[in-house]
Amino acid sequence: MLRFRQVPRVQHGGGPQAVQLLRGSGAMAAGYVLAVLASSLWGLTYCLDERLLAGQSVYRLYYLHTLGGLAVTAPLLWWRGESLLPVGGTAPAGGSASPAWLIIVTMLVATIAALSILKSIQLLGAQRAAVFEISYPLFVVLFGALLFDQAVSPRVLLGGLLIFAGAFVIMRSEG
């Protein structure tokens, strides 16, 4: 069941509290910058993938993506002193250990999602596939509420619905 929570409103007209809310903390600002960076890199990836998928299978390209990810993350894990696999129920500092079933489900879901978007890019092209795939924020909100009892702000839900509706309008207008 969806739970709605009240979101504090920013008072226009100033005050240090309003300025702090608008600026956000350093970590929050970095989070937004990284989200935009990820978004732009995914856009580039979709365009590159569309070209690559003209000459090879979805499975081969996903395999190459996976090898690339491993080549980048394995040395980073080693440098940070982390193991490649979550063994012994250890948790990062300040965190809690993730149950094995959740890790396995996440790996399966992420693989299905990656293969699905690659096939969508192959069938529709990068631009069309991206327009509809961008509706995922709505599903983040819904799954967070349904699976993990996360509160949903009405504005976030409305924003997700508008993104989904906008993607649908674009897809219907292209025929």
Image: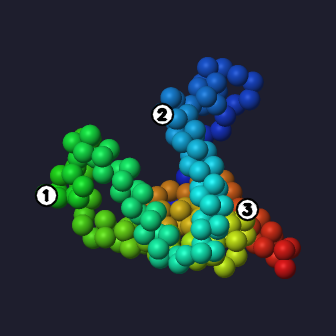
In the image, residue 36 lies at what x, y percent?
61, 45
In percent of width and height, residue 155 lies at 66, 53
Across and down, in percent, residue 54 comes to 63, 74
Horizontal side, residue 147 vs residue 99: left or right: right
Instruction: List x then y, in percent, for residue 55.
Output: 59, 75
- In front: 32, or 58? 58
In front of the other: label 3 or label 2?
2
Can residue 72 be seen in the rendering of this structure?
yes
Q: Name the residue under label 1.
A: 88
Residue 162: which disc? 3
Q: Which of 121 and 146 is in front in this view?
A: 121
Nearer the observer, 51 or 161: 51
Residue at x-position 41% and y-position 63%? 66
For residue 160, what is the image quadrant?
bottom right
Sequence-first disc among 3 and 1: 1
Gap in Å between the C-alphas at discs 3 and 1? 44 Å
Q: Is mark 2 on a helix, strand or loop?
A: helix
Per the model, the C-alpha gap separating discs 3 and 2 is 28 Å
Does residue 163 sit above or below 91 in this rendering?
A: below
Mark 3 / mark 2, whichever is N-terminal: 2
Q: In this view, does 41 lie above or below 26?
A: below
Residue marked by disc 2: 27
Q: What residue type is labelled 2?
A: Ala
